[in-house]
Image (cartoon, grey):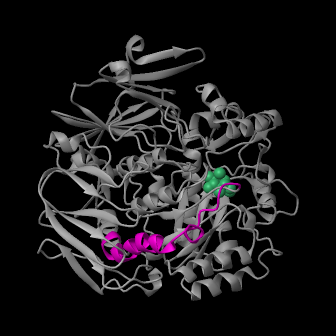
């Protein structure tokens, strides 16, 4: 049962599909008792809500946030933020995913559908409450009652609609790095992977492929014939995936800029002129993604890239990230740079307002014919960029496209996936990646993954192998790192055979991964789940924070600690323990309960659920173009596996 309480006049966020019979709508404004439910805060009033928690309740959800699978004991703030210091105490990340489920004797979910800033205090200081403060009086609040956390989540996934459908090649292994300058650098990456026999499906092009970081342009000195180059690579089974940033360079002669200005498609400042802020290309204007016409125009701009043969894109800097603006100084940029170099400096400033936060109060959008301050609709900006790109690409390309964004809001999953932003090379970030996968899947973001190996910092051989062994199971499997860090392509490390073994598992498992992903997508289900969703009656399974279910048949328990080759695993039922040594799968049955497993650095271990089987390819392919989804063998229990197969590129028809 789903009820939607409407407070004030909320704007359309595109998160929940229209007019669903399963939802009953209630006008709730008249229920407000100002002293209990409204916080008067100077000129603005906020809504507040409070839900009691029982001692053993688990709170699941909130998507891309720090903290555990169980969100108790912390505060989270939905206010999309570009902050590369993913420290434990951080409250806001790149996305706003305002859905959580309280699961215990009863299971109930809440979705706070508003693009405003929202704070979730989840059992902070053992308050035994979830306290939510919404910084607006306009809100749709969905309330979902179900039989279990999983049931509530499935009802939620049903109302927010089907996830975007990536092509099969997007499930291959991808290499990326900020710093690849020209076609020679890209060729070197591809040939080095080929030399060591590690499969590869795509290489990402970061900002250096553009002419002075101007969106929808190509630097012709670096890539003299981009169209021929893109097609040449595609013929060898490698896709190139360019980045697109949110800001459009202010420069006469830049066609995108000129058309945007002429048509009033940019966000405006207090004087109603296009708002100016500096990002990579220098001063830029931000498209006003809240206007339908501006979205259509921006989405169509991708034709400048699809005409060259590109079929995959990553959208970045779309919180939006601002270095400085007409309202804030370059000093702030320096301040940010110092924070990046000295994380302890940033740590001390926790809670203080950063540069972008100040700027967000100084620009405006046309939202449903109203003029609204960016701050009040902030959390939708990146999502609406994804919406613009996705809708554009659906028209421009006859087949599926790949798209993943940094910033997001629930609803954007219909147009593209996300990656979890600028993490760093540490085992703590690998663990966070696992947690994110569970809670993002609850919000419809099935196609997601982190920068494998870490974006900032230097990735050790051990960390890269352990991270790859986890990323083997995430739909987006991309190795990405920042300029200035130690280069982390797999062939740069000693004994590359070990990397080949770990990535080989991904390619051998692809028929299962693709099948389970597509089944979850079609049935509006989760691809990766916390154990408590599958074993809700098993109190021990409900408390597991470092294992996940992958599809219907697999459970994983990756090594998440430095220097470890053993770990304890909890099996909620008897399972087949599978070891993969790069060539062969070794299976043995393990009983329900706690076990200690050994996982050498060059092996991957996973489990197949009781009475389930999976399929793996018989041979290793070097990319998905060479992969035959039908040439498979079963492993696990002696039952049939119901495999979903399609051509991997045609659009889904229903
Ligand atoms: C941002 C992105 C990162 C990218 C860099 C340069 O930090 O998050 O992935 O490499 O910008 O474009």
Q: Is residue 19 left or right of residue 426?
A: left
Q: Is residue 21 visible?
A: no
350 relative to 596, above or below:
above
Quadrant that contains the N terminus: top left
Name the foreground residue: 555 vs 103: 555
Q: Is 507 covered by the magenta stretch?
A: yes
Q: Quadrant of residue 234?
A: bottom right
Q: Position of residue 112 (x, y in %)?
A: 41, 36
Q: Position of residue 572 (x, y in %)?
A: 15, 51
- Which SS type dominates the magenta stretch? helix
Q: Position of residue 282 (x, y in %)?
A: 82, 50
Ligand 1 is found in which quarter of the picture? Answer: bottom right
Q: Quadrant of residue 626?
A: bottom left
Quadrant that contains the C terminus: bottom left
Q: Quadrant of residue 300?
A: bottom right
Name the foreground residue: 190 vs 42: 190
Name the foreground residue: 615 vs 563: 563
Magenta-colored span: 484-513
Q: Is 554 covered by the magenta stretch?
A: no
Q: Is residue 576 left or right of residue 216?
A: left
Q: Farthest residue in the top direction?
A: 35
Q: Position of residue 496 (x, y in %)?
A: 51, 73
State the residue at coordinates (51%, 55%): 419
State the residue at coordinates (73%, 36%): 338
Q: Is residue 503 visible?
A: yes
306 relative to 112, above or below:
below
State the residue at coordinates (56%, 82%): 194
Count how many numbered circles sit on residues in the image.
0
Q: Farthest residue in the right direction?
A: 252
């Amino acid at each position: 049962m789903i009820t939607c309480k409407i407070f004030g006049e909320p704007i359309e966020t595109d998160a929940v599909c229209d007019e669903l019979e399963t939802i009953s709508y209630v006008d709730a404004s008249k229920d407000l008792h100002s002293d209990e439910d409204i916080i008067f805060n100077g000129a603005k009033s906020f809504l507040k809500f409070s839900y009691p928690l029982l001692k053993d309740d688990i709170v699941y959800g909130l998507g891309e946030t720090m903290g555990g699978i169980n969100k108790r004991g912390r505060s989270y703030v939905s206010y999309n933020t570009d902050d590369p210091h993913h420290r434990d105490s951080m409250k806001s990340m790149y996305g706003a995913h305002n859905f959580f489920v309280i699961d215990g004797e009863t299971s109930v979910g809440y979705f706070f559908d508003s693009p405003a800033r929202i704070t979730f205090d989840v059992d902070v200081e053992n308050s035994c409450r979830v306290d939510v403060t919404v910084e607006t009086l306009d809100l749709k609040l969905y309330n979902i009652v179900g039989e279990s956390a999983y049931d509530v989540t499935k009802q939620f996934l049903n109302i927010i609609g089907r996830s975007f459908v990536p092509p099969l090649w997007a499930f291959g292994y991808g290499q990326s790095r900020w710093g690849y300058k020209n076609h020679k650098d890209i060729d070197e990456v591809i040939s080095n992977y080929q030399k060591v026999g590690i499969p590869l499906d795509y290489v990402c092009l970061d900002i250096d492929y553009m002419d002075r970081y101007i969106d929808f342009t190509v630097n012709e000195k670096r890539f003299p014939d981009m169209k021929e180059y893109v097609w040449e690579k595609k013929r060898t089974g490698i896709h190139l995936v360019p980045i697109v940033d949110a800001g459009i360079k202010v420069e006469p002669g830049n066609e995108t800029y000129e058309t945007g200005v002429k048509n009033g498609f940019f966000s405006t400042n207090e004087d109603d002129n296009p708002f100016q802020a500096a990002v990579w290309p220098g001063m830029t204007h931000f498209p006003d993604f809240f206007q339908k016409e501006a979205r259509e125009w921006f989405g169509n701009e991708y034709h400048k890239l699809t005409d060259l043969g590109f079929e995959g894109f990553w959208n970045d800097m779309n919180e939006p990230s601002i270095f400085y603006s007409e309202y804030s100084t370059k000093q702030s940029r320096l301040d940010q740079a110092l924070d990046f170099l000295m994380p302890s400096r940033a740590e001390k400033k926790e809670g203080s307002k950063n540069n972008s936060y100040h700027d967000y109060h100084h620009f405006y959008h046309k939202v449903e014919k109203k003029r609204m301050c960016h701050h009040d609709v902030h959390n939708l900006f990146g999502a609406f960029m994804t919406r613009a790109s996705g809708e554009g690409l659906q028209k421009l390309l006859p087949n599926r496209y790949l798209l993943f964004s940094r910033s997001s809001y629930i609803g954007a999953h219909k147009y593209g996936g996300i990656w979890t932003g600028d993490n760093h090379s540490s085992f703590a970030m690998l663990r966070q990646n696992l947690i994110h996968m569970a809670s993002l899947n609850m919000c419809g973001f099935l196609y997601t993954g982190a920068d494998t190996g870490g974006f900032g910092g230097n990735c050790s051989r051990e960390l890269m192998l352990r991270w790859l062994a986890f990323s083997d199971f995430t739909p987006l499997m991309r190795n990405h790192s920042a300029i200035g860090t130690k280069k982390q392509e797999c062939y740069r490390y000693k004994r590359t055979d070990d990397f080949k073994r770990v990535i080989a598992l991904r390619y051998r498992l692809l028929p299962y991964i693709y099948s389970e992903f597509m089944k979850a997508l079609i049935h509006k289900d989760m691809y990766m789940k916390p154990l408590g969703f599958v074993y809700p009656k098993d109190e021990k399974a409900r408390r597991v924070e470092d294992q996940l279910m992958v599809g219907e048949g697999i459970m994983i328990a990756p090594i998440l600690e430095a220097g470890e080759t053993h770990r304890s695993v909890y099996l909620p039922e008897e399972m087949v323990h599978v070891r993969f040594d790069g060539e062969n799968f070794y299976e043995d049955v393990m009983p329900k309960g706690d076990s200690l497993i050994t996982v050498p650095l060059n092996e991957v271990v996973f489990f197949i659920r009781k009475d389930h089987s999976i399929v793996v390819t018989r041979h290793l392919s070097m990319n998905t173009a060479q992969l035959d989804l039908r040439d498979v063998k079963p492993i696990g229990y002696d039952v049939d596996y119901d495999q979903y197969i399609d051509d991997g590129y045609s659009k889904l028809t229903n």
